[in-house]
Amino acid sequence: MGWVPSIGFLERYRIPRGGPAGIELTSESDPTMIDPNFILLYVDSPARSAGFYTQLLGRPPVEESPTFAMFALASGTMLGLWSRHTVEPAATAGGGGSEVAFAVDSDDTVRRMFDEWSTRGLPVLQAPVAMDFGYTFVATDPDGHRLRVFAPAGH
């Protein structure tokens, strides 16, 4: 059996009732509206992927086991790395079918991160380019998950 979150884990990493940082939920907000706050990526080796994301994010995982690792991001979102061999129900899709996106403050930051990630040897699928939504590039993690860095248009 794979990783299963305990009640204590869920309580410890729950997003505050008022909402994630920068987003205020008012009393008029629909209490039934859901707010996704976990990203789960299925990986071949949680330990290898945890090492990769520790370097990429500049922080260690807050939870780690042989089949799972979890990172607490500054936004309040949790990034989980779950072994594709133990996830239940079994995953049928591999990496590359979605993206984890990192919004940054400027085109210069996009270029700087591109240079840093290229120097680290991350596979690059798209070099920096201006697109309709902003300036961006795309690299991949060890499991082929797309990592997009972008500065929104108008910044």
Image (spheres, rainbow, N blue to C red):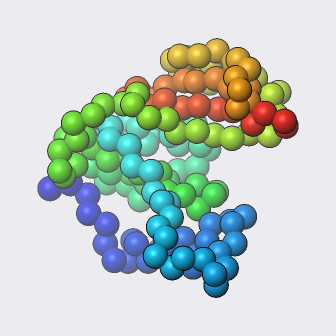
Q: Is residue 89 left or right of residue 99?
A: left
Q: Quadrant of residue 151?
A: top right
Q: How many marks?
A: 0
Residue 116 visible, this angle: no
62 or 90, nearer to the observer: 90
Q: Is residue 54 or residue 19 the one in the foreground?
A: 19
Q: For this view, does 94 lie left or right of residue 111? A: left
**Residue sticking out furthest to the bottom:** 27
Rendered view: 48 above or below 19:
above
Query: Residue placed farthest to the left in the image?
Result: 1
Q: What residue is shown at x 44% (from left), y 35% (from top)?
A: 98
> Residue at image x 72%, y 64%?
22
Q: Residue at 49% across / 25% down in the picture? A: 140
Question: Measured along the vertical axis of the image, is residue 106 above or below residue 74?
Answer: above
Q: Position of residue 42 (x, y in %)?
A: 32, 41
Q: Which x, y percent locates residue 146?
A: 48, 29
Horizontal side of residue 75 vs 66, given as left or right: right
Give the camera-side residue of 153 and 76.
Answer: 153
Q: Nearer the viewer, residue 51 or 83?
A: 83
Locate residue 10: give its quadrant: bottom left
Return the x and y of residue 148 as percentages of the image width and height: 59, 31
Q: Residue at x 21, y 36 (%)?
A: 92
Residue 90 makes an appearance in the image: yes
In the rendered image, which quarter contains the C terminus?
top right
